[in-house]
């Protein structure tokens, strides 16, 4: 699989299989407190920026440096062009954070996304604390 295709697959087939159709204003971050809320808010911010097509915000503010390095290595044009291509193919932008687990400066967020016909997909996003902010370090694995 070509590197560009791999990045697009990571962005689209992972938890970024986010729904422009049927999206809601539900903020699942409000279901958490403290650092767990901050982790959930990072996921909500990813959802919001994805829905708006704001590749700059995602690349600049929401992705961890190590993930940016992987994307840049796989995509000659860098993060923003890779995301622009990937977000164009996204079917769903609606994520609900169901569970947050924190271990020091690492966290996981279990999220569900509506994939249609009464089906939900469950993914796990990995985040890392960079300074005072939680950033997406891995885009997810399906459970």
Image (tube, grey):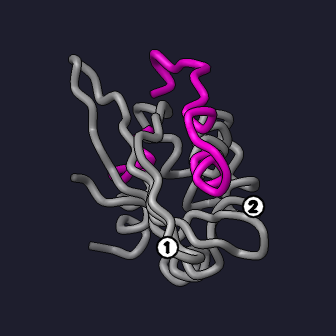
- Where residue 64 appears, x then y in whole percent? 62, 72
Q: Is residue 119 above or below residue 83?
A: above
Quadrant occupied by the N terminus = bottom left
Q: Of 132 and 35, which appears nearest the observer?
A: 35
Q: Which mark is residue 61?
A: 2
The local secondary structure at tag 2 comes to helix
Q: Which mark is residue 103?
A: 1
Indicate which disc, 1 or 2, sits on the residue closer to the N terminus: 2
Residue at the front extreme, as displayed:
33
Q: Is residue 129 above or below residue 89?
A: below
Q: Is residue 55 left or right of residue 71?
A: right
Answer whether residue 143 is visible to the viewer in this image: yes
24 in the magenta segment: yes
Q: Residues within 10 Å of mark 1 (few under 14, many from 20)?
A: few
- Where residue 105 appears, x then y in whole percent? 59, 76
Answer whether residue 75 is visible to the viewer in this image: no
Q: Residues within 10 Å of mark 2 (few under 14, many from 20)?
A: some
Q: Is residue 95 left or right of residue 140?
A: right
Mark toward the viewer: 1 or 2: 1
Q: Of 118 and 92, which appears nearest the observer?
A: 118
| Residue drawn at 60 percent across, 75 percent down | 68
Give the magenta-colored segment's residue range.
12-40
| Residue drawn at 55 percent across, 61 percent down | 82
- Where residue 24 appears, x then y in whole percent? 55, 18
């Amino acid at each position: 699989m070509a590197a560009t295709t791999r990045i697009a697959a990571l962005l689209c087939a992972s938890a970024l299989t986010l729904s422009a159709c049927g999206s809601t204003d539900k903020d699942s971050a409000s279901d958490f407190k403290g650092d767990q809320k901050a982790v959930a808010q990072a996921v909500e911010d990813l959802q919001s920026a994805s829905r708006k097509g704001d590749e700059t915000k995602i690349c600049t503010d929401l992705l961890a440096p190590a993930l940016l390095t992987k994307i840049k290595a796989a995509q000659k044009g860098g993060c923003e062009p890779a995301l622009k291509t990937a977000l164009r193919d996204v079917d769903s932008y609606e994520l609900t954070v169901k569970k947050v687990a924190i271990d020091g400066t690492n966290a996981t967020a279990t999220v569900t996304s509506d994939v249609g016909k009464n089906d939900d997909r469950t993914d796990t996003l990995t985040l890392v604390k960079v300074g005072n902010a939680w950033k997406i370090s891995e885009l997810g694995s399906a459970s």
